Amino acid sequence: MESLTALKTERTEHFIKALDHRLPGRIPLDEAKELAREFGGRMDRKFRSATNALNHWRPQQVTPALERACEQGWAERGLGLDCEQCKLHSFIPLQASTSQAICPACSTPDRYGRDNGKSVEIMYRLNGFIDRAVDNGVLTHLLVVAALQKRAPDSHFLPGVDVVFDDGDTKEVDIFGVYEGKVLAGEAKVSATEFANEGQIRRDIELSRRLKADVHVMAAIATSDLVWQKRVPSGTARPSTRHGRSNADDESRSSPRNGCHPADVPQCALVRSLPHRGS
């Protein structure tokens, strides 16, 4: 997942952050997302080598994941070309490469990119479908669904649901479905640090309450930079929480931290027994 995320073209999130930096607070989030969808799709897909795909990871660690993505048809191998004439940075699929490197934009003869100036360097690029899916958080949703279904095989979920309430209000919920016979709703993020905003957590829990969910889930793929705190925002009830870890060596099902415990899948915090208004 980290390798795929490193290769994604930063359209939606990058565009929204740049827009908010230049026009802070002036464009509602929903409108910013629509602009990102409209203009972000015009960006060329990102490509990287195994050497620079992930910081602090050695190529020997990254290459197997990138090669597996290629075997599954999720990514493709190619060569990079930095044109001295038109200054464009181009990706040349291996099957389209020639003995003489030619810039696809201006047709000027050039050289393929090399690893430290030595051998020609293999680049990796996600296919268009997977690139969009990763950018829009689809893979994150599916990994969370897989984690929950591994814990409770009889569960059923819908990822990325647009909901419309009786008053016409529309919201989006990342995960919605039935978990262990109870209605579950909640959020799925790539990084656990995205749950650092307490105001956002309040809004997420309130949305789950409006959906009359019994369980609220907060799930993240990358959790190494997060220390879980056993609390919920003040002003809400004090439900019990169960935390899951992706550590494969912690197999104790009796531990209260094992609410969601699959190996190599997202960490989940399940907030149970949400009080419903009027109850």
Image (tube, rainbow, N blue to C red):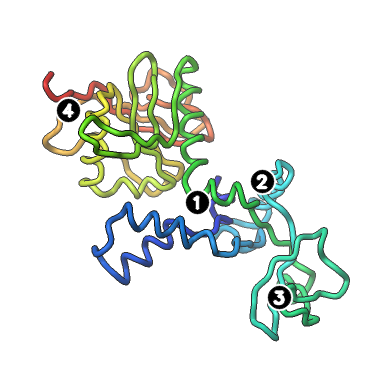
> CA separation, marks 2 and 4?
43 Å
Q: Could you tell me how far apart the alpha carbons at marks 4 and 3 are, in whole angstroms?
A: 60 Å
Query: What's under tag 4, amino acid-wise?
Result: Arg
The C terminus sits in image quarter = top left
Spatial CA span between label 3 and label 2: 25 Å
Q: Position of residue 38 (x, y in %)?
A: 46, 58
Please name the residue that numbered disc 4 is placed on. 238
**Residue 105 against residue 243 in the figure, above or below:** below
Question: Residue tagged by mark 1?
Answer: 135
Q: Which label lies toward us, 1 or 4? A: 1
Q: Name the residue that disc number 2 marks.
A: 74
Q: Which element carries disc 3, helix, strand or loop?
A: loop
Tag of residue 105 = 3
Residue 52, picture quadrant: bottom right
The mark nearer the N terminus, 4 or 3, is: 3
Taking 219 as reference, is 113 above or below it? below
Residue 50 placement (x, y as % from top left): 66, 58
Q: Secondary structure at mark 2?
A: loop
Identify the amino acid type marked 1. Asp
Element assignment for label 1: helix
Residue at 46 percent of width and 42 percent of height = 221
